[in-house]
Amino acid sequence: MSAFEIGLVEWFYNNYEMQKPFLLNAVFAAYPDFRKQYFEDYNLDENEEDLPTLATVDELSKVVVLEEVFVHQISKDGVPYVGYQFDCRWEEEHGLGVLMHNSRVVEIDGADCAYVLWIAEQDRDG
């Protein structure tokens, strides 16, 4: 690992707590759409037991669990892109991914958006 890459990991270590509320608020805001799509895709009646309606960000733990964090070697202004991969109740096979740069959510979708590099490159160069 290069000194540059170590610096990016150190940035993450020092700034995770700053990123956390932006990350969780983005997942919470997107959850109703993921929930709705799940029931439509599988032609199911809404079942509060499977995917409950959530009233607060703190309730996210009922439906998602953080599995992996990816600190990308791609950065902008010295700040790395960081991907968060979650296990989630509505997409058990593929999971949920969130790609962030600093306090901004770049993309939230399937787990792959947390770890594929081209999304970060496109955002950085775009």
Image (spheres, rainbow, N blue to C red):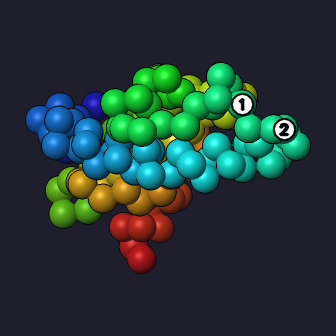
Could you say which quadrant of the image residue 3 lies in?
top left
Write the residue at 53% across / 45% down. 31
Q: Is residue 116 left or right of residue 1?
A: right
* The N terminus, quarter of image: top left
Question: Could you classify mark 1 by the number of other residues whose Cα lies within 10 Å: few (under 14), some (14-19), or many (20 or more)?
Answer: few
Looking at the picture, how far across and down is residue 89, in whole percent?
Answer: 63, 27
Q: Please tell me the numbered disc located at residue 22.
A: none
Three-letter code, disc 1: Asn
Three-letter code, disc 2: Leu
Q: Which residue is mark 2?
A: 44
Could you say which quadrant of the image residue 15 lies in?
top left
Q: Is residue 14 left or right of residue 89?
A: left
Q: Is residue 87 left or right of residue 70?
A: right
* The C terminus, quarter of image: bottom left
* Residue occupying the far right of the picture: 43
Q: Disc 2 on helix, strand or loop?
A: loop
Write the residue at 41% across / 29% down. 59
Write the residue at 65% across / 22% down. 49
* Residue occupying the far left of the picture: 14
- Contact flag, marks 2 and 1 (Cβ < 8 Å): yes
Q: Is residue 51 left or right of residue 11?
A: right
Name the one closer to the observer, 121 or 94: 94
Looking at the picture, how far across and down is residue 21, in whole percent?
Answer: 25, 43
Name the one closer to the observer, 114 or 54: 54
Looking at the picture, how far across and down is residue 5, in whole percent?
Answer: 25, 40
Q: Which residue is mark 1?
A: 47
